[in-house]
Image (cartoon, helix red, strand yellow):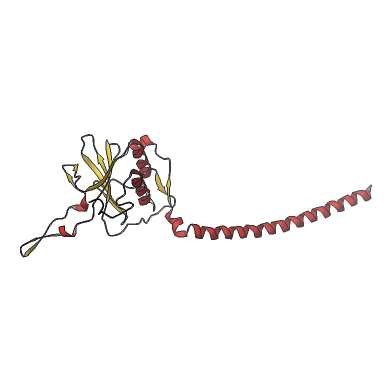
Amino acid sequence: MRFTKITFLIFVLFSFSKAFGNEKRQTTDTTKHTVKIHHKISYNRRHVLPDSLLYYNDCVFTHRYTVIQRLGKYPFNKAVKILAISYNGEPDPNDDVKTIGDTTTPRKEKPHGLFFHNDTLDLSNIFEIKQLTAEQVAKLTNIMFNTKARIPNYHPDPGRKCFEPRDALIFYDKKGKVFDYMEICFECMMYESKSNKLFLTSVYCNQQFDLIKKFLISLGIQFGTTTTDASKYN
């Protein structure tokens, strides 16, 4: 009986030692394999999505505000009609000066090619105009209020020095008057509003211009988003 117990104990120790050795080898192999896979994934990421694009792709949607909450924010709480438009925002070089005889008199240039008369939009140089539906307004408010940066950016891109907007969002009140508007230049990555209260997104993120551009394209606005050739609109 004692011999049997000793034999059994030796067998268990031998089996455990063998199993431990296999496990160690397996762990080593698995570790090596994991390292290989890790390098392969990193290699693919660098080729599929460069680091610059990883940083650029930082706009994310949240569900912080419901549709009702978003519509309760300015300017949507005041707007009864919203237009998306494109227009000729490039200044005409012939309008820079006015020649009278031998003298050259500077002539004040109308700003950005978007004109209003008594808070009424001048349609004389408008190329495209789309009135937003309730569903489209909901999408726009989602971009403006439910978009944030994946990585906090404390140094937003100031855009370029140029500003030749070709697209705009126009907000009308219940009296049919324009109370606010936002002009957008996608080439220069700049925008301005009448009130300085309008922002593409509530928190700056690098894709905000692309988000608004895609939204305008979905409405059918092409000038300023997919083309800057004004010849076919004149």
Q: Is residue 46 left or right of residue 79?
A: right
Which sits in the foreground, 178 or 6?
Answer: 178
Which sits in the foreground, 93 or 38?
Answer: 93
Which sits in the foreground, 114 or 15?
Answer: 114
What number of labels is visible? 0
Q: Residue 141: x, y in percent? A: 35, 41
Question: Who's the residue at 20% across and 38% down the image?
Answer: 177
Q: Is residue 33 left or right of residue 175?
A: right
Q: Is residue 40 visible?
A: yes
Q: Residue 191: x, y in percent? A: 29, 51
Taking 1 as reference, is 77 above or below it? above
Q: Residue 99: x, y in percent? A: 9, 61
Taking 68 as reference, is 43 above or below it? below
Q: Is residue 79 visible?
A: no
Q: Residue 10: x, y in percent? A: 87, 53
What residue occupies the far front of the structure in this picture? 232
